[in-house]
């Protein structure tokens, strides 16, 4: 009796998996506000699990290893806050004090320069009388916006309570994810159909390698770039160099966005600070060019390596699509899903190149005949040349 799956049965199973994926996506969209601390804690637990396993291999118990890794995470977070918060606070005070200077530079230099080259009237829109008339002419829309704003403020108390609850839950959930991560993986593996366990294990390991190389490596590159930009801009004399460098380093998690943002902010800050002189602007550009060279030739090859497989365009699209569909939870899940999708696409490409649809029947016949002829030629003894 033939027990092989029929095409109808295979198609039905595929539709079942699609239905399960659709239900999971709907649940994530529905529970997105609640899932934020759980997803973030799961990511932290996944990042810390290798360190817990290393401590277990040297003889520590699981609970002791989790406590040590969790304490190290808390200490690193507190150390970063103690060092960075006072520095950022001083930079923000400097920025607030320099706001009138930036306003004068925009009104007196930047906008007239743009007007001369584009023919647009931009400075006139900043005239107080014209702004007052515009507000009077659009008071109904302004009233609607104000009503919406105050309505948001009335609901912000509940939002603030939710954020406080999430902050309280995050360390608790992270601890439990660290402690029970291996058990969770075993339970998920036990749910996989036995005839697919080998390929599912392979794809899961590849996804873990890709995502781990990207997140761990890119996080270190982000910290290194933030330090390079902040120190470099401060050394060349930019007053807001520390703040701009930190912002550029943090945004560099999205490829090319951090450098572009840092260059724009650094050039504007240099022009305002120097009064239009280009010496400081040139030094700022040197800092960012040096940072990009270090990232391209030293940081990324040594820290991240070539195991990522995630194209920058795919990273940007995944983050934007996740945020659009599921909000902040979608942004957290975007990169893991992109890593898994990348591995699945490579596996699908591998299966496709091995299928008759790609190779074709004629190519297989020609290849077999070529192999048969070669085997016959090798089996025949070499003929001696005839004597003339």
Image (spheres, grey):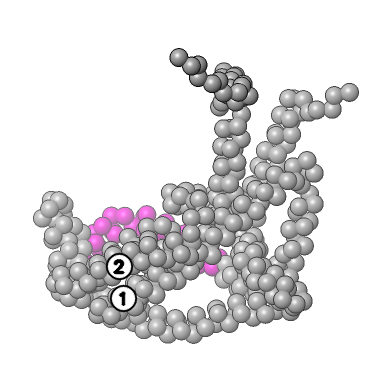
Can residue 195 be seen at all in this image of the molecule?
Answer: yes
- Helix, strand or loop at label 1? It is helix
Q: Which mark is residue 232?
A: 1
User: Relative to 151, is 330 above or below?
Assistant: above
Q: Residue 307 at what x, y percent from top left?
A: 52, 55
Q: Residue 128 at what x, y percent from top left?
A: 21, 66
User: Which callout, 1 or 2, points to the residue nearer the camera?
Assistant: 2
> Which image quadrant for residue 60?
bottom right
Report the number of numbered marks.
Answer: 2
Can residue 95 be seen at all in this image of the molecule?
Answer: no
The reply to whether dot 1 and dot 2 touch (C-beta < 8 Å) is yes
Q: Which residues are magenta?
A: 128-156
Give the Cα distance between marks 1 and 2.
Answer: 9 Å
> Which image quadrant for residue 211?
bottom right
Single out the residue that lies furthest toward the front: 388
Q: Does residue 137 belong to the magenta stretch? A: yes
Question: Which residue does the numbered mark 2 point to in the structure image?
Answer: 290
Secondary structure mostly seen in magenta is helix
């Amino acid at each position: 009796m033939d027990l092989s799956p029929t095409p109808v049965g295979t198609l039905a199973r595929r539709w079942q998996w699609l239905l399960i994926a659709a239900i999971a996506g709907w649940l994530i969209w529905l529970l997105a506000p609640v899932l934020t601390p759980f997803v973030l804690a799961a990511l932290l637990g996944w990042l810390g699990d290798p360190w817990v396993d290393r401590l277990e291999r040297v003889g520590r118990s699981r609970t002791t290893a989790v406590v040590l890794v969790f304490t190290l995470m808390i200490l690193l977070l507190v150390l970063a806050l103690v060092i960075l918060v006072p520095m950022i606070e001083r930079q923000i005070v400097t920025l607030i004090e320099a706001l009138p200077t930036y306003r004068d530079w925009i009104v007196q230099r930047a906008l007239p320069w743009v007007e001369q080259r584009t023919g647009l009237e931009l400075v006139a829109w900043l005239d107080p009388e014209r702004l007052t008339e515009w507000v009077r002419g659009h008071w109904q829309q302004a009233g609607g916006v104000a009503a919406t704003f105050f309505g948001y403020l009335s609901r912000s108390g509940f939002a603030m309570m939710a954020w406080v609850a999430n902050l309280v839950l995050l360390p608790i959930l992270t601890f439990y994810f660290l402690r029970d991560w291996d058990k969770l993986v075993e339970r998920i593996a036990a749910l996989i159909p036995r005839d697919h366990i080998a390929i599912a294990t392979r794809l899961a390991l590849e996804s873990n390698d890709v995502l781990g190389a990207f997140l761990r490596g890119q996080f270190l590159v982000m910290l290194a770039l933030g330090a390079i930009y902040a120190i470099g801009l401060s050394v060349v004399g930019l007053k807001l160099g520390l703040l701009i460098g930190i912002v550029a380093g943090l945004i560099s998690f999205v490829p090319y966005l951090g450098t572009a943002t840092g260059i724009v902010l650094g050039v504007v800050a240099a022009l305002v600070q120097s009064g239009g002189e280009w010496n400081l602007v040139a030094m700022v550009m040197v800092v960012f060019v040096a940072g990009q060279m270090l990232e391209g030739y030293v940081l990324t090859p040594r820290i991240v390596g070539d195991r990522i497989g995630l194209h920058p365009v795919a990273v940007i699209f995944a983050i934007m699509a996740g945020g659009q569909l599921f909000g902040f939870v979608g942004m957290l899940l975007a990169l893991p899903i992109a890593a898994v999708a990348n591995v699945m696409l490579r596996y699908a490409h591998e299966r496709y190149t091995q299928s008759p649809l790609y190779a074709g029947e004629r190519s297989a016949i020609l290849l077999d005949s070529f192999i048969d002829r070669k085997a016959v030629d090798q089996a025949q003894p070499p003929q001696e040349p005839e004597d003339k």
